[in-house]
Amino acid sequence: KVRSMLDISFPPKEEDTSNGVAPKLGVEASIEHELKYRVSANNTDARPVKLYQSVAWSVHDRLVDAFDQTQAYWKEKDPKHIYYLSAEFLMGRTLTNAVNNLDLGGEYAEALKKYGADLETVATGELDAALGNGGLGRLAACFLDSMASLDLPGWGYGIRYRYGMFKQGVKDGLQVELPDYWLDNGNPWEIRRPETQFKVGFYGSLEDGKWVPGEEVIAEAYDVPIPGYKTKTCGNLRLWDALAPEEFDLEAFNAGDYSKAVEQKRRADGITAVLYPNDATEEGKELRLKQQFFFVSASLQDTIARYLEQHKDLAGLPDKACFQMNDTHPTIAVAELMRLLIDEHGLSYDDAWAITTKCVAYTNHTVMPEALEKWPVRVLAKLLPRHMQLIEQINSNWLDSITGHVTAKVEAELAASDAEKQKKAAAAAEERKAALVAAEAKGEEALAAAKKVVSEEEAAEEKPADKATLVEEKLKTYSIIQENQWTKGEMLVNMAYLAVVGSFAVNGVAAIHSEIIKTDIFPHFVEIFPERFQNKTNGVTLRRWLAYCNPELSALITEALGTDEWVRDATLLAKLKPFAEDAAFRARWREVKQQKKKALAERIREQTGYQVSTEPMYDIHVKRIHEYKRQYMNAISLIHRYKVLKEMTPEQRAKAVPRVVVFGGKAASAYYMAKKIVALILSIGETVNNDPEIGDLLKVVFLPNYNVSEAELIIPAAEISQHISTAGTEASGTSNMKFALNGALIIGTLDGANIEIGENTGFENLFIFGVKADEINKLREDRKNFSDYDPRYTAALQMVSSGVFGRPEYFEDLVASITDMNRGNDWFLLANDFASYMDAQDAIDELYRDQEEWTRRSIIYTASNGFFSSDRTIDQYAREIWNVQPTPQP
Ligand code: 475
């Protein structure tokens, strides 16, 4: 610990009667106080953002009360804690969530009347905390909400990025990336803790086995209180900022080298400056590894320091702390925990290993090969020499421990192949004998020739394999340190393997995904530790993703069920099912949807200038842009739809089902194809939306800067939502759950959580198409020729190539990626699923004509998917992995 709390003696603590949510100053007075003193709005024209700030600070004070009491209570009770280590927390806005979780919605609404404002509008003054890329980061945020709501002692640990996810703009038909200045107006939701700082080292060397870092930075804590839903519990998200050990290098400064003097500060600033905007890809940048180690080291030091305040013996750490690693990004925790226990706290290697492997668990979120982190040994050894040494030791112990198993496996394989070979050899010997006999009958010359052939054949006969070599080869497939497949000679540390070896539990995030990681990613680890592998199907918080983003639908649900308990106990939603049969209820359900569509139409106009009607079907495809998620296939289907509409007679058009198709999602800045997909969607929109013949029959909208707050607006307005990844590629998906709960129907493949949503909702209520995951490998092998493709598909691509949507040269690569054997060769099998996708689209149009049946299904979706509450997911983690108990305050 660098600094400790200054030794000030506080006056004796007053009896706290505030019950955590009602400080002495009432809501109205506190807003006024903040307006005047904190944000000094009196002599300005109290702009809405100032009102937001005052309300936020007023809520902040109430949060801090709840926070202090919870943390003090947990300290006293000393229950086991879960520490959720994640490089990303995609929190979005906080105000609405905090006010409602604290059950202060009514009071704040009342107080705001004085300003002629409502909470909903005031809340838009807040900038999203976008400290995450996509699904993985948002899942971490939902988990924090559920942990607090279930009274589970838990903290999140991450990085306080000064710039979160880039802001996406559109310029000249292309995505542009703008910096996200999310902290510019101050952040009322965090508490800076200059009293909580830890040193984190990098580089340097090992001297007498001891690590002497060549560079040091200070990690300083910021706490973000996480209020549970209608409970006194308020958890914590602790985010680390990096500071230079001394703000200025005075010696350099005095010597006149100003730039050298600020160099340290610049380097520290760099560590927490930006979130890498890569979703499901790894760039292998050294700074990224620095970020990972930085937050992991600070978090582990912090946990151990707090543990040691109350306990002497680190042997008990596993009874008090569990570290859940959100994907491989925090995996260096395995080595850092070892280092802290051995080098800083004097434990033996074996004792340290026993503790580490009881404290650490790992969640895998993706099977995309490009996302599986592998750090070059060279980079790790330079940045973290001691950790590289420990990883080598961990690996060598690991390989030793399985050599027996691997040898037995090789022996069994040899025995099996030996028996096979002996059979073959006997048959061959038989044949040769027969040949000699036959040759002998033909005379001397033939016999000599035959003998020569026989001796050559005998010489060519397979030698028995060398067991030792085979064992060595096989062991390599288990090794945490492996040779780079592409760059011979370069050694890599496979972080997922390190995570599996160092963890006591490994889980996937949907049923199918948890199977795929067992069969395709870690099959050889499953042989050794079958009991280590688990499934924990993802979930989403119903607070943010239904109750607060869709208050209109929530009110209707509460009215129908006669209680709002479903917000806490999502299984109660099942009781909505009978209402699907009630025509009057269906009419009201439709009215709500209509209202939400109107709000989205307004947003579309604001953001894109397109005027869209609220009558058509709202068809939504929002998520990170990725080839595997196949926004491109949707785009091709829309080109076809456009073509069909153009060819229709006016009578036919009058019968067509109109659609507004909304896309949203960011493309990683360096992801070439993803950016072209965004451009293609924008171009299609430009052509279709300005075609007077088409009018309201089809609108194709790309809504820029998809983020948590946009999602809260978009999802409630959806009637159909698209989850159409190539089977076996989407680990789970979580927006599918949000859409289902908001009564949007799903068109999707048998992938990720779509499958479980189908099981809960009844597959007959989804629009499922496409091949199954176990067919993919075979299909990839025999991908067809372009000439065999569905004619609708070919025609649509031809329209792109011929420039119907402009910029044909720009889209040339994109078209080639799915049509050219040598340039991508349709890896994600768009051509293959296209026809069944179109059938599913036709079925959607057909059903939409029957609004009563459509609405019935919509209600069934909401009623059927309470299972996907993150409260259920977290309850399972707590019981089946963490062994952490609810610890509510009395
Ligand atoms: C899956 N992000 C979803 C979701 O489990 C799943 C990877 C590397 C670097 C930075 N970010 C990433 C992911 O891998 C990711 O977001 N994965 C997603 O996790 C939650 O629902 O299917 O794609």
Image: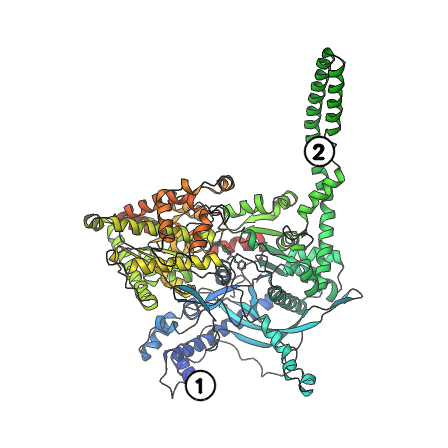
The image quarter in which residue 547 lies: bottom left
Between 258 and 733, the residue placed more toward the observer is 258
Q: Position of residue 348 (x, y in %)?
A: 76, 59
Q: CA distance from mark 1 to mark 2?
A: 81 Å
Numbered disc in front, either 1 or 2: 2
Q: Amino acid at mark 2?
A: Leu
- Mark 1 nearby-residue class (10 Å; few <14, some 14–19, many ≥20): few
Query: Is residue 746 visible to us here?
Result: no
| Secondary element at image label 1 | helix
- When the figure is inspected, residue 230 is found, relative to residue 183, above or below; the finding is above
Residue that numbered label 1 is attached to: 37
Position of the N terminus by quadrant = bottom right
| Secondary element at image label 2 | helix
Label whose residue precedes the other's in the sequence (1 or 2): 1
Q: Position of residue 422 (x, y in %)?
A: 71, 25
Please give the count of numbered marks on the rendered protein: 2
The residue most toward the left is 651
Q: Residue at x 48, y 63 (%)?
A: 145
Q: Would residue 317 be found to the left or right of residue 206 on screen?
A: left
Q: Residue at x 60, y 68 (%)?
A: 76
Residue that numbered label 2 is attached to: 414
